Image: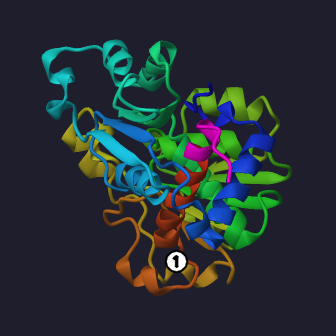
């Protein structure tokens, strides 16, 4: 039995298998429409979510399976003080596989140590979001045709953004990938990511505070929102929330084939006028997430067609 708590839980070969299967499902969804008949996915979401929870549910339903679970801690026994360990022990007898989102870093890992079914981390605090990373990798590979030889700009909240941390951890395993980290000083990437991942692996990167200056260099621009829920006080959030806003004027110096990604939800960091630009692929990215999660569910349940 395998759990996916971090993107690094999947080897390069396993990542390639999941992405290839996701593409097969995308090309021929009917072929896979009943392959999880009789199987149940438990969605244990202790934190609000729209895309991740619904895309997991859509994935299992598209595979012919069923879904059970809760969408907030308030509607679960966590409100009564039940531990994650006890919850997963019980849920393991109800379902075949579990997707868990939790505000505390490490909670899905704890669950995996007590679980008798595969656990997928659907986001834990500011730590990891492996299925969003798989979605990002699938989007890049499908639309760019490669996962190597890329210059990727990450812009916005790089300190608390778990999608940023996960994708950096995944992309450093591919050759000739460079990072441009664009953020205010208060929202720069955590030190551990800088020293233990980028510096330790001799990855080429630079940290800047100006998006316009580096725009011409980028093959991909990964925008993120400044997350109110990660701040300890409202004043800091208000001061930083409008730090970087992408509009059509800023895109004038971008490469014509640059891709704009965003894990969503968007607040105001991408102007709606950008949505019609052919480089804006964030809604397509969200759609791809269903196929990626279908593929991952199949792999973890050892289901082949």
Front residue (pair 296, 149): 296
Q: Position of residue 158 (x, y in %)?
A: 50, 45
Q: Position of residue 131 (x, y in %)?
A: 54, 46
Q: Position of residue 3 (x, y in %)?
A: 58, 28
Q: Secondary structure at mark 1?
A: helix
Where is 95 relative to 40, above or below?
Answer: above
Residue 64, image quadrant: bottom left
Q: How many marks?
A: 1
Q: Residues within 10 Å of mark 1 (few under 14, many from 20)?
A: few
Where is 92 relative to 73, above or below?
Answer: above
Q: Which residues are magenta?
A: 297-305
Front residue (pair 155, 262): 262
Q: Which residue is mark 1?
A: 250
Front residue (pair 296, 217): 296
Front residue (pair 159, 43): 43
The residue drawn where x is 28% and y is 33% is 46
Q: Position of residue 157 (x, y in %)?
A: 45, 48
Residue found farthest to the right? 175
Quadrant of image for the N terminus? top right
Quadrant of image for the C terminus? bottom right
> Can residue 86 be seen here?
yes
The residue drawn where x is 33% and y is 47% is 227
The residue drawn where x is 78% and y is 46% is 204
> Can residue 208 be seen here?
no
The reply, left or right, for residue 132 in relation to residue 26 is left
The residue drawn where x is 15% and y is 23% is 79
Examine the structure image and report whether residue 302 is included in the region drawn in magenta.
yes
* Colour scheme of the picture: rainbow
Where is 196 relative to 128, above or below?
Answer: above
Examine the structure image and report whether residue 159 is included in the region drawn in magenta.
no
């Amino acid at each position: 039995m395998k759990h996916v708590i971090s993107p690094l839980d999947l080897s390069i070969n396993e990542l390639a298998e999941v992405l290839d299967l996701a593409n097969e499902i995308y090309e021929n969804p009917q072929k896979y429409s009943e392959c999880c008949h009789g199987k149940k996915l438990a969605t244990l979401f202790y934190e609000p979510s729209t895309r991740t929870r619904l895309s997991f549910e859509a994935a299992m339903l598209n595979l012919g399976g069923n879904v059970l679970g809760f969408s907030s801690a308030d509607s679960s026994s966590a409100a009564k003080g039940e531990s994650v360990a006890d919850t997963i022990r019980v849920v393991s007898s109800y379902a075949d596989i579990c997707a868990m989102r939790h505000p505390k870093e490490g909670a899905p890992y704890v669950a995996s140590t007590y679980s008798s079914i595969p656990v997928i981390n659907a986001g834990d605090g500011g730590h990891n979001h492996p299925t969003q990373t798989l979605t990002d990798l699938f989007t890049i590979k499908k639309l760019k045709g490669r996962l190597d030889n890329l210059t990727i700009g990450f812009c916005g909240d790089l300190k608390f953004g778990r999608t940023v941390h996960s994708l950096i951890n995944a992309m450093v395993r591919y050759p000739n990938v460079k990072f441009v980290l664009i953020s205010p000083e208060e929202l720069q990437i955590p030190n551990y990511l800088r020293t233990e991942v980028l510096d330790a692996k001799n990855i080429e990167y630079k940290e800047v505070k100006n998006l316009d200056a580096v725009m011409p260099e980028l093959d991909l621009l990964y925008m993120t929102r400044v997350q109110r829920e990660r701040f300890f006080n409202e004043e800091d959030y208000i001061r930083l929330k409008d730090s970087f806003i992408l509009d059509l004027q800023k895109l004038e110096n971008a490469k014509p084939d640059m891709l704009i990604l965003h894990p969503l939800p968007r607040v105001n960091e991408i102007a709606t006028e950008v949505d019609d630009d052919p480089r804006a692929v964030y809604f397509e990215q969200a759609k791809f997430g269903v196929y990626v999660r279908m593929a991952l569910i199949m792999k973890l349940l050892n289901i082949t067609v």
